[in-house]
Amino acid sequence: MSRGYQHTLVASYIGYITQALINNFAPLLFLTFQNNYGIPLSQITMLVTVNFLTQLVTDLVAARVADRIGYRTCIVAAHLFSAIGLLGLALFPILLGNAYIGLLLAVICYAIGGGIIEVLISPIVEACPTPSKSAAMSLLHSFYCWGYAFVVIISTAFFALIGIDHWRILAIIWALLPLYNAVYFTRVPIATLTEPGAGMSLKGLFKEKQFWLFLMLMVCAGASEQAVSQWSSAFAEAALHVPKMVGDLAGSCLFTLLMGLSRLLHSKSSRQIQPYFYMLGSILLCAVSYLMISLSPWPVLALVGCGLCGLSVGILWPGVFSLSARHFPMGGTAMFALLALGGDLGCSAGPTLVGLIADASTERLTMGILTAMVFPMLFFAGLLLLSKTKRTENTTG
């Protein structure tokens, strides 16, 4: 691979760190927003909803226009939107005179950037002339995990040393990362998966029965991951009896670091172990971790199950991307956009199901997690169905 495309990969890795930054920095400040601006919890919750919905809409729009506008223009714009949104967290509430409207506008800006990044970074890396596409995809997605842990640890350290009252300074500092990467992406070579206009259309993809199976796998991958990830801090606090800040580090960071480790290990071993069998073993391990979390009588063992879940789900999202790209080589940007959309829907469905069951059950979260085991079970069934098709046999060979 040429040195130029090595820079493309580095820019893509930074892009996924940016994605982790814009998704996870603002939630660290929700209580600060509530205290400083007097914003009720219901409106703060709406910031999360707006972020999610904006990214979903952006996924759909990007599927239609990215090929026409060009990857470079879109990915540079994505990082500029991300930088503006992070700057906006610090500045818009002051400049607009209405704190909530300012925060909402900032969230919309960086959510647009995040949606474009999610759609385009994977096909950009898939189009690079790497020796192993599956390894490159796993390594790419591991940087979201490293980025998440990096953002939480650095932000927590900043708040402890400098003071959370100075959070605006940190928001401005964080905005320099996507701003730098926007410039970086103007200088690296960017290949495309298909010639302009040659990729499959949305309508064409929907006509393919196998694509619906891949879409289901993506929904289950996102749900299997987030059903536990969203509750890992709560398990850490209950198991270790520690403050929330320590629970975040012991719960969320443990889950994320082990998920990143899983993706890193797969990137190193993808030539020895076929992605299909790696995913099959991972989803079985995921089911075991769900049982540990929901049925263990010892809280510490449930916490171990949370970490084990992070290790098991790491390969699912990038693995489905890789298998889809081999199954539909002309899928192009539209395919990656729809898969990202499916993954996002799963990321919402998993925690939502856990929460609904927990509210209706005397066993609370444990019953919610046990019910959410339906997602890894569906993923396992989908993999078995894929193995029966000749085309999939070729993609995993």
Image: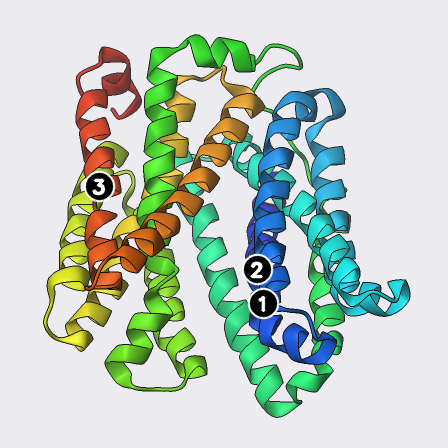
Task: From the image, tell me which residue sits under label 2.
Answer: 45
Does the residue at mark 3 contact the one at mark 2 (Cβ under 8 Å)? no
Task: From the image, tell me which residue sits under label 3.
Answer: 374
Is residue 254 visible in the rendered image? The answer is: no
Residues at marks 3 and 2, CA–CA distance in whole angstroms:
27 Å
Dot 3 or dot 1, earlier in sequence:
1
User: Residue 91: x and y, percent?
Assistant: 83, 67
Give the residue type that dot 3 points to: Val
Give the residue type that dot 1 points to: Leu
Dot 3 or dot 2, earlier in sequence:
2
User: Residue 60: x and y, percent?
Assistant: 60, 28
Q: Is residue 231 rendered to the left or right of residue 296?
A: right
Residues at marks 1 and 2, CA–CA distance in whole angstroms:
6 Å
User: Residue 248: x and y, percent?
Assistant: 42, 74
Does the residue at mark 1 contact the one at mark 2 (Cβ under 8 Å)? yes
User: Residue 344: x and y, percent?
Assistant: 47, 41
Task: From the image, tell me which residue sits under label 1.
Answer: 41
